[in-house]
Image: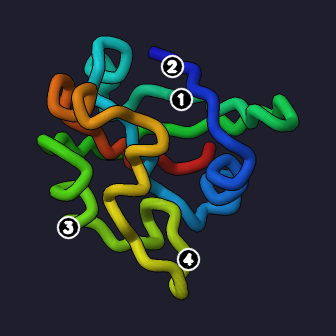
Amino acid sequence: MIHKMNLWNESFNKIKNKTKTIEMRLCDEKRSIICIGDSIEFTNTKTNEICKCEVVNLYKYENFDELYKHHNKTTIGYADNEVADPDDMLAYYSAEKIEQYGVLGIEVIVK
């Protein structure tokens, strides 16, 4: 199955350059059907460039605190000199939605 997702320019480039290997999302209806072996076409919201990836692993957690505890900060998109803070995800998702759906780490490789 092919899934389509939009990514901000910075995250898109990190996935494309293979420095970020785990995309973090809510585990909502759209994401809960993703399976290992599926394809994801990420679209850069700034340039409309597409990066095709394969899903190689899925990590389900109750919240971003748990996800951050179990993954290296560079794999989820932070630079070595940055502080990885799960509260950063509140800029994208409300606490209510996180509690409602839980979260998903989608590990990908660029095709």
Tell me how far mark 4 sits from mark 2, CA to CA. Answer: 27 Å
Is there a contact, CB below 8 Å, between mark 4 and mark 1?
no
- Badge number at residue 3: 2
Amino acid type, label 4: Ala
Three-letter amino acid code at disc 1? Ile
N-term mark: 3 or 2: 2
Vertical comparison of 52 with 110: above or below: above
The amino acid pointed to by label 3 is Lys
Picture disc at residue 69? 3
| Residue 53 coordinates in the image, percent (x, y) | 57, 39
Q: Secondary structure at mark 2?
A: strand
Cα distance between the residues tagged 3 and 2: 27 Å
N-terminal-most mark, 2 or 1: 2
- Determine which residue is flagged by label 1: 40
- Secondary structure under the numbered disc 4 in the rendered image: loop
Q: How many residues crowd mark 2 within 10 Å: few (<14), some (14–19), many (20+)?
A: some
Pair 4/2: label in front: 4
Q: Nearer the viewer, mark 1 or mark 3?
A: 3
Colour scheme: rainbow
Dot 3 and dot 2 residues touching (CB under 8 Å): no
Q: Name the residue type under label 2.
A: His
Q: Residue at x 37, y 14 (%)?
A: 30
Q: Quadrant of residue 72?
A: bottom left
Q: Residue furthest bottom?
A: 81
N-terminal of the two: label 1 or label 3?
Answer: 1
Q: Nearer the viewer, residue 68 or 23?
A: 68
Residue, x 16% and y 56% (percent of image)?
Answer: 66
* Spot occupied by residue 91 in the image (x, y as percentages of width and height): 47, 44
Question: In this figure, which residue is indicated by the disc labeled 4?
Answer: 79
